[in-house]
């Protein structure tokens, strides 16, 4: 058996065999030896077609059919979602699949071998799979894999699909436009199937995701009437269902090689830009699709080394890591690269606009020298939201966000703001609470807050959320220990209304009610 169900029923008297035969992308010479053998073994050859009766699968296998083959044409009742069937489009198809399976089952019960022909691979977006799901558990079944249209399209383009650590994503063009855009933005190499009427939507999604320029088009790969080109140049009215959009591998493309040390950041001919992105509190699971796309498209990555290490290495990209205390210098360096034509992603932790790199870049970009450099800021999951989610919902009502670092503002200002927020009974999310060289602020902040909050006010102590060292604890405000707090810790201090409860597993949960009592 080749690729069939793991457990097959025992064949008895009068029980035939079901063969799902992959025919490849269209050229009969690309059929496998086993596919040819399977058709020769069959008593019955079945194939799907639209109501016009022409079957691409049958045309591929025509040279293998014999006069004594019993042919079963499985004709779809509808090919669009417009139907007067009482169950709608899906109801019409379900009824058709049930009737088709019953027709094939009659042959199988009579002891005949039934070969169901499938373009490409039988279990890859193929019509055969609907027969397989209804019959394979009842009859001995073999699935013969075939060359997919995606592989054929890459071959006709002469472009590798994916290489090294790149991931290949296959998308149906029938997805909603927003979903297509998000997935295109976040993927490496991509193949988009099922074009035809979906082509205008797919093209818009490619453009919105910034990937239209690299998208290639293949129509009827290996078949008569084959056409290839750039997606941007294709007339939407000319696109058939049997076409594929491909975003090939980026590895090793001309111009992708990294510059030599000391070389010019760019040749001045490209249109450079700076995109400030947030990686979230930890690794790749916290990246948004938009951020993934921006990181993949960048020529240069600039950032604090710890944050750069969260971003997968890509062929042709240059990485410029630096210390966490040189934000202004890092921002100007990124802008200078962009001014010379490079596409630069400035990598920040959490959300770049919350105590992070976005402001540093925009401050530097306000200089006359960088007036022509476009700067975009893409949001990320900030530490306060990540910590709150781990603890429950402590930010469920009004809250304030403060940094306890006195590197960029005096402690007197911090203390004054703490008192104001505490007096207003706001939940507080406290960033940068302490470090090895600065550990007294947490104790001082606790003293200030206890002037306005009860000693048992819940405090979320969240360290390294999303990382290997994640630890989230809930302690009373009076017992908050500064020694247990460092720069990888975020504190959330509850209001007078914040509550705690325990889940079925005994885990403590913190939440702040959405309603505030009447004063």
Image: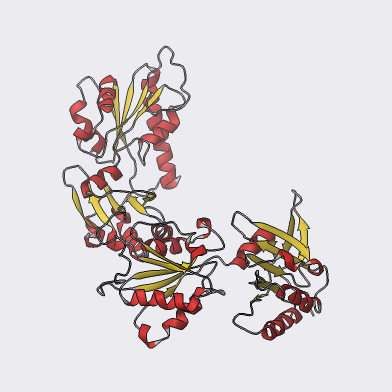
For the point 53% across and 59% down, the residue is: 286
Q: For the image shown, how many numbered marks are present on the structure?
A: 0
Image quarter (top left, top right, bottom left or bottom right) of the N terminus = top left
Asked if residue 231 is positioned above or below residue 136 in the image, the reply reads below
Asked if residue 106 is positioned above or below residue 423 in the image, the reply reads above
In this view of the protein, which residue sits in the foreground, 174 or 403?
Answer: 403
Q: Is residue 217 left or right of residue 493?
A: left
For the point 20% across and 26% down, the residue is: 64
Structure colour scheme: secondary structure
Q: Is residue 66 left or right of residue 479?
A: left
Q: Residue furthest right?
A: 455
Residue 375 visible somewhere in the drawing? no
Residue 118 visible somewhere in the drawing? yes
For the point 28% across and 19% down, the residue is: 41
Locate residue 47: give its quadrant: top left
**Residue 322 in picture, x, y percent from top left:** 47, 69
In this view of the protein, which residue sits in the foreground, 453 or 73?
Answer: 453
**Residue 432 in picture, x, y percent from top left:** 63, 72
Q: Is residue 141 left or right of residue 428?
A: left
Asked if residue 503 is positioned above or below residue 355 in the image, the reply reads above
Image quarter (top left, top right, bottom left or bottom right) of the C terminus = bottom right
Asked if residue 224 is positioned above or below residue 367 in the image, the reply reads above
**Residue 195 in picture, x, y percent from top left:** 30, 52
**Residue 425 in picture, x, y percent from top left:** 75, 77
For the point 27% across and 33% down, the residue is: 23
């Amino acid at each position: 058996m080749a690729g069939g169900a793991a457990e097959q029923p025992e064949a008895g008297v009068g029980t035939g065999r079901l063969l799902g035969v992959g025919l490849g992308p269209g050229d009969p010479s690309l059929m496998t030896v086993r596919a040819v053998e399977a058709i020769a073994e069959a008593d019955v050859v079945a194939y799907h077609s639209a109501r016009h009766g022409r079957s691409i699968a049958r045309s591929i296998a025509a040279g293998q059919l014999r006069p004594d083959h019993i042919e079963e044409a499985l004709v779809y009742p509808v090919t669009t979602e417009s139907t007067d069937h009482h169950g709608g489009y899906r109801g019409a198809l379900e009824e058709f699949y049930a009737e088709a399976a019953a027709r094939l089952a009659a042959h199988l019960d009579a002891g005949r071998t039934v070969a169901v022909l499938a373009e490409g691979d039988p279990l890859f977006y193929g019509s055969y799979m609907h027969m397989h799901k209804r019959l394979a558990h009842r009859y001995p079944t073999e699935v013969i894999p075939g060359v997919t249209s995606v592989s054929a399209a890459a071959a006709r383009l002469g472009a590798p699909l994916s290489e090294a650590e790149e991931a290949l994503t296959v998308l149906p063009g029938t997805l909603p436009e927003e979903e297509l855009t998000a997935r295109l933005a976040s993927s490496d190499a991509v193949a988009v199937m099922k074009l035809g009427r979906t082509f205008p939507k797919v093209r818009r999604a490619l453009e919105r995701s910034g990937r239209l320029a690299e998208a290639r088009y293949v129509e009827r790969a290996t078949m008569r009437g084959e056409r290839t080109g750039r997606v941007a140049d294709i007339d939407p009215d000319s696109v058939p269902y049997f076409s594929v959009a491909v975003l090939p591998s980026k590895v090793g493309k001309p111009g992708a090689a990294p510059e030599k040390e000391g070389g010019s950041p760019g040749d001045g001919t490209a249109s450079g830009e700076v995109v400030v992105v947030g990686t979230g509190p930890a690794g790749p699971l916290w990246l948004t699709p938009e951020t993934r796309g921006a990181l993949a498209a960048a020529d240069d990555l600039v950032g604090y080394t710890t944050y750069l290490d969260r971003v997968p290495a890509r062929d042709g990209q240059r990485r410029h890591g630096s210390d966490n205390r040189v934000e202004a210098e890092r921002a100007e360096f990124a802008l200078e690269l962009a001014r010379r034509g490079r596409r630069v992603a400035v990598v920040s932790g959490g959300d770049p606009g919350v105590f992070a790199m976005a402001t540093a870049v925009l401050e530097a970009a306000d200089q006359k020298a960088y007036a022509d450099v476009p700067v975009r800021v893409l949001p990320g999951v900030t530490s306060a939201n990540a910590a709150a989610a781990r603890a429950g919902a402590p930010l469920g009502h009004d809250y304030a966000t403060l940094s306890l670092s006195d590197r960029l503002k005096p402690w007197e200002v911090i203390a004054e703001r703490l008192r104001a927020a505490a007096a207003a009974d706001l939940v507080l999310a406290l960033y940068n609470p302490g470090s090895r060289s600065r550990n007294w602020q947490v104790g001082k902040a606790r003293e200030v807050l206890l002037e306005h909050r009860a000693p048992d006010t819940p405090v979320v102590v969240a360290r390294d959320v999303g990382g290997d060292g994640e630890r989230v604890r809930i302690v009373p405000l009076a017992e908050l220990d500064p020694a247990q707090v460092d720069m990888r810790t975020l504190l959330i201090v509850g209001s007078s209304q914040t509550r705690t409860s325990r889940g079925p597993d005994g885990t403590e949960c913190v939440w702040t009610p959405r309603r505030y009592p009447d004063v």
